Image (spheres, helix red, strand yellow):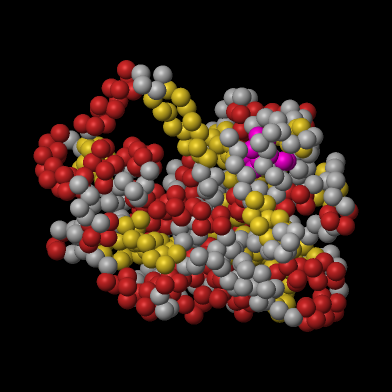
């Protein structure tokens, strides 16, 4: 018999394993693993499971090696075992260190070193890029831009480390030139540099240009791709519709501009943040003052201190995401999404919360207008190669840019695109930066009318859960929804676990989780959505205790602030805006360990709660 165990990783992806409990089948499987050989893509040599385990002992635990063995290492034919035997024996004895082994792993093709890729900050959806590169047997050199990033990013590093052939810390080098010199000493031919997540985009551009790679974006327009105010000004200079705005770090100047404009509300955002980090909805001067206090001087998730903010007009309309990939300045649209939002809830009439994010058909009057606009935006900001994730508001005067993100779609985006259209966005990215755009050229409508229309093979919805109860969760959200046996569900991502405190949802950080849904029938997804909303509204999904059960984690400061029994002063104002892409970070911050002020010296002490 087997016992299923679900492991929830820090990147919000869940894996299910079956551990054998001494049964005859389990013993037989153990003997098969001992005798079987598989190729470790790290060096292209075949090893038994025991040999692989012996080599990685002390670096990775048994479960990680077992997963690597089963999911990544490829089985080999019987006649390939003898050839690898001597090398395997050396690996089993642990005689070679990882770096030494990497240096001997040069390809024998024409005597040239192996082609490798640099990935800067492979966090969030960057894990799908790692998987794609591993499939292509491309060695991965990880570069971390900073250790000052959000803990949610840094925690995922260890989980992804098994993919890396080399790992470099940028902060250990005296700038980009020194880092590039180190990269040149490695036994690889670096053929591509990827920004693995938002914090890594800027450094990736600098490294790629310093290495004189062909598939890089121009540094002279880097600010237009990174600075949220500069990207709007860049559009304006090229006659492309843009948001009205003012940029400054001084509160007096911001208040003066807002007062003279006298058209509230406004949106305040750090010029160089990640996604919608630190984006505030300001209805008056007091809101703007608070937003300035929260933004200026704060360390954003990219590891940099906010020095200026962009104050922009509030764009009225529906919000869209356009996922693209580019090669030699030409562009393909590979997915389009539309947000649906709920304004006003029975327990909070001021609440604005995302309801869902839905994949659109590739063509239509609105879609065609969006794609045409986004392609002009990409041309303006110098996006010539690689993936981009562009957020746009469709206003009464047409599409207006929210922001450009020169990276993959966040979270599970690449996976959802693959499930719904047949091709992962990570595949598109690797093709344009590594493979000379072979796939791109097949899809691009060169010399043909129209543009490439991605195949929508299945419908896809990311449903945001909304809780109307408050207390300590009696039952698992995941188990309750899974028991409904809904055909369209592929993954359930709860923000709160059984026994934890759950607050009434008012915005994305206080939402209770999300459900990923993919199916051939949109009607099926709608029916499954109805059933989920039904158990939400009936209270079945959110049965709670008023008092904390034994072993319940101490209420985090963020959850405590979100409680509806807090004072009205604490709840006012609710001006922060958040993006679905930031869900994992938002929920992590809501449930982060408690920091309590020490009564004697006033210092903050982290309280670690262990629940058995």
Residue 375 in view in this figure: no
Residue 125 in view in this figure: yes
Q: Which residue is drawn at 75% across and 71% down?
A: 292
Say if the magenta span includes residue 497: yes
Residue 329 position in % (x across, y down): 44, 68
The residue closer to the viewer here, 295 or 65, is: 65
Q: Which residue is drawn at 67% across and 76% down?
A: 308
Image quadrant in which you'd find residue 465? top right
Image quadrant in which you'd find residue 499? top right
Q: Is the magenta stretch mostly helix, strand or loop?
A: loop
Query: Residue lying farthest right?
Result: 568
Magenta region, residue range: 494-502
Residue 490 position in % (x across, y down): 54, 35
The residue closer to the viewer here, 229 or 152, is: 152
- Classify 503 as above or below 448: above
Image quadrant in which you'd find residue 259? bottom right
Q: Which residue is drawn at 15% across and 34% down?
A: 78
**Going by the image, does 515 lie left or right of 201?**
right
User: Which quadrant, please, contains the N terminus?
Assistant: top left
**Going by the image, does 28 lie left or right of 546?**
left
Residue 37 position in % (x across, y down): 21, 37
User: Which quadrant, please, contains the C terminus?
Assistant: top right
């Amino acid at each position: 018999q087997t016992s299923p165990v679900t492991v929830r990783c820090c990147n919000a992806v869940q894996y299910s394993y079956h551990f054998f409990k001494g049964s005859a089948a389990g013993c037989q499987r153990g003997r098969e693993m001992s005798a079987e050989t598989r190729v470790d893509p790290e060096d292209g040599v075949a090893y038994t499971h025991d040999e692989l385990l012996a080599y990685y002992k002390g670096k990775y635990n048994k479960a990680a090696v077992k997963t690597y063995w089963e999911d990544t290492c490829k089985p080999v034919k019987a006649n390939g075992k003898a050839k690898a035997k001597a090398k395997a024996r050396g690996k089993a004895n642990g005689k070679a260190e990882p770096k030494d082994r990497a240096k001997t792993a040069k390809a024998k093709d024409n005597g040239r070193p192996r082609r490798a890729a640099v990935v800067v900050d492979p966090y969030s959806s960057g894990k799908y890029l790692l998987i794609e590169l591993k499939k292509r047997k491309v060695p991965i050199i990880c570069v971390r831009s900073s250790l000052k990033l959000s803990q949610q990013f840094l925690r995922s590093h260890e989980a992804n480390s098994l993919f890396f052939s080399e790992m470099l810390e940028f902060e250990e080098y005296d700038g980009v030139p020194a880092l590039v010199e180190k990269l040149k000493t490695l036994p690889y031919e670096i053929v591509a540099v990827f920004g693995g997540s938002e914090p890594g985009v800027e450094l990736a551009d600098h490294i790629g240009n310093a290495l004189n790679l062909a598939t890089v974006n121009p540094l002279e327009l880097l600010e237009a791709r990174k600075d949220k105010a500069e990207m709007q000004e860049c559009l304006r200079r090229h006659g492309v519709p843009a948001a009205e705005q003012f940029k400054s770090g001084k509160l007096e100047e911001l208040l003066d501009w807002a007062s003279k404009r006298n058209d509230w509300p406004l949106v305040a955002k750090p010029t160089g943040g990640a996604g919608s980090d630190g984006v505030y909805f300001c209805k008056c001067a007091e809101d703007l003052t608070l937003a300035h206090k929260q933004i200026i001087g704060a360390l954003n998730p990219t590891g940099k201190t906010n020095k200026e903010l962009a104050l922009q007009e509030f764009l009225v309309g529906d919000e869209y995401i356009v996922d693209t990939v580019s090669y030699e300045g030409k562009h393909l649209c590979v997915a389009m999404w539309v947000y649906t939002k709920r304004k006003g809830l029975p327990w909070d009439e001021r609440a604005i919360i995302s309801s869902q994010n839905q994949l659109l058909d590739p063509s239509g009057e609105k879609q065609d207008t969006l794609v045409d606009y986004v392609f002009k935006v990409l041309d303006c900001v110098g996006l010539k190669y690689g993936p981009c994730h562009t957020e746009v508001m469709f206003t009464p005067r047409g599409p207006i840019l929210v922001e450009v993100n020169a990276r993959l779609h966040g979270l599970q985006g690449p996976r959802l695109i693959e499930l719904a259209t047949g091709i992962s966005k990570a595949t598109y990215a690797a093709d344009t930066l590594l493979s000379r755009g072979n796939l791109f050229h097949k899809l691009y409508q060169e010399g043909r009318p129209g543009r490439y229309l991605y195949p929508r093979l299945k419908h896809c919805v990311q449903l945001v859960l909304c809780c109307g109860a408050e207390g300590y969760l009696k039952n698992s959200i995941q188990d309750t929804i899974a028991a409904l046996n809904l055909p369209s569900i592929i993954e359930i991502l709860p923000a709160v676990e059984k026994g934890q405190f759950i607050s009434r949802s008012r915005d994305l950080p206080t939402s209770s989780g999300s459900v990923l849904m993919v199916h051939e029938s949109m009607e099926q997804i709608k029916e499954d959505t109805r059933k989920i909303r039904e158990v939400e509204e009936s209270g079945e999904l959110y049965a709670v205790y008023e008092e904390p059960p034994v072993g319940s984690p101490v209420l985090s400061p963020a959850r405590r602030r979100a409680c509806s029994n807090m004072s009205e002063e604490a709840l006012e104002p609710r001006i922060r805006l958040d993006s679905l892409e930031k869900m994992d970070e938002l929920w992590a911050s809501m449930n982060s360990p408690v920091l309590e002020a020490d009564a004697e010296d006033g210092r903050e002490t982290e309280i670690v709660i262990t629940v058995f």
